[in-house]
């Protein structure tokens, strides 16, 4: 078999490199949703930027709330990020730095720069989170509080120590909500409570049916009946679609 030529070897290496770069870009693209989520979490005064290191002159892949600094997709890597990059590349366990700094307009910020690595451990991108502290305090806090129209819809997260506490709190809150609903008739409230709990998946928890029946002062058979009725109602639309 003839020896592989230098040109062939070069093309093979270029193809491998191209594949790796494509994999790195796909990995960076997955962080796009994280950029949106962080900006949603911390509000309109939090700028979140996703950088690729493939081209420092056009590194910004995605930015949310970039109006604070004028940052746009396709913008170059900042001088500050360039200064941090050698240290981030040397780090093995720690993935980034958080510090107080200033925007280019001189306003105070709390910034976090996180190194994004590929499966080989190479730094392929940066995730920069800049919280602009120069914004009015009431505007900063407004993003952490529900709007007046949304307060009635706030559903508190349950951080419970055991399953019984989880079921008890969920049942109590569901009972309170349905009892306060004028559109649910009194003789239908128990059924609606069981149906709502079923939709929340509470009956996937062991012994939940017994706990709910005790709380509502109805038999377990009645709870099972309401669940079966709900399951039939959920199945009916699919039957209609299959048999038009």
Image (cartoon, helix red, strand yellow):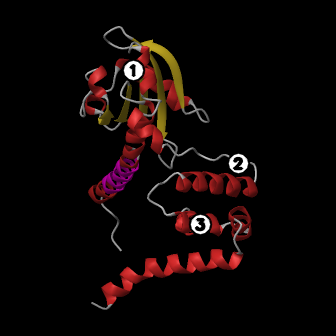
Between the residue at mark 3 and the residue at mark 1, the CA separation in whole angstroms equals: 43 Å
Which residue is at 67% across, 51% downward? 169
Q: Which secondary structure, mark 2? A: loop
Q: Which secondary structure, mark 3? A: helix
Please identify the quarter of the rendering in which residue 35 is found.
top left
Residue named by callout 1: 139
Which residue is at 27% across, 56% downward? 7
Judge whether residue 23 is colored magenta. yes
Front residue of this view, candidates 5 and 71: 71
Q: Which residues are magenta?
A: 13-28
Front residue of this view, candidates 180 and 129: 180
Residue named by callout 2: 160
Q: Is residue 158 visible?
A: yes
Q: Main secondary structure of the magenta part?
A: helix
Q: Residues within 10 Å of mark 1 (few under 14, many from 20)?
A: few
Q: Is residue 125 visible?
A: no
Residue named by callout 3: 190
Question: Which tag is nearer the camera, tag 3 or tag 2?
Answer: 3
Q: Residues within 10 Å of mark 2 (few under 14, many from 20)?
A: few
Between the residue at mark 1 and the residue at mark 2, the CA separation in whole angstroms equals: 32 Å
Which residue is at 36% across, 36% downward? 50
Say which label, 3 or 1, has the lower sequence index.
Answer: 1
Q: Which secondary structure, mark 1? A: helix
Q: Position of residue 181 (x, y in %)?
A: 48, 54
Say which label, 3 or 2, has the lower sequence index.
Answer: 2
Q: Position of residue 33 (x, y in %)?
A: 39, 46
Which residue is outermost to the bottom? 243
The quadrant of the rendering that contains the C terminus is bottom left
Q: Viewed as shown, does residue 93 lie left or right of 109?
A: right
Say which label, 1 or 2, has the lower sequence index.
Answer: 1
């Amino acid at each position: 078999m003839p020896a592989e030529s230098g040109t062939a070897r070069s093309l093979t290496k270029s193809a491998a490199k191209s594949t790796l770069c494509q994999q790195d870009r796909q990995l960076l693209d997955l962080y796009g949703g994280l950029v949106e989520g962080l900006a949603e979490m911390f509000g309109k005064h939090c700028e979140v930027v996703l950088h690729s290191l493939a081209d420092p002159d056009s590194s910004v892949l995605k930015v949310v709330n970039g109006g604070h600094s004028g940052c746009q997709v396709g913008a170059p890597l900042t001088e500050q990020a360039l200064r941090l990059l050698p240290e981030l590349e040397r780090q093995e366990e720690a993935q980034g730095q958080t510090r107080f700094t200033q925007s280019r307009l001189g306003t105070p910020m709390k910034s976090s720069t996180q190194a994004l690595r590929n499966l080989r451990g190479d730094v392929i991108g940066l995730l920069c989170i800049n919280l602009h502290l120069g914004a009015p305090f009431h505007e900063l806090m407004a993003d952490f509080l529900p709007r007046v129209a949304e307060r009635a819809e706030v559903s508190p997260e349950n951080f419970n120590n055991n399953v019984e506490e989880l079921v008890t709190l969920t049942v109590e809150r569901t009972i309170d909500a349905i009892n306060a609903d004028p559109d649910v008739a009194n003789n239908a409230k128990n059924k609606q409570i069981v149906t709502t709990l079923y939709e929340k998946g509470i009956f996937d928890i062991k012994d939940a049916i017994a706990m709910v029946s005790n709380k509502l002062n109805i038999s377990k058979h009645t709870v099972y009946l309401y669940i079966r009725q709900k399951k039939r109602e959920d199945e009916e639309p699919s039957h209609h679609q299959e048999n038009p």
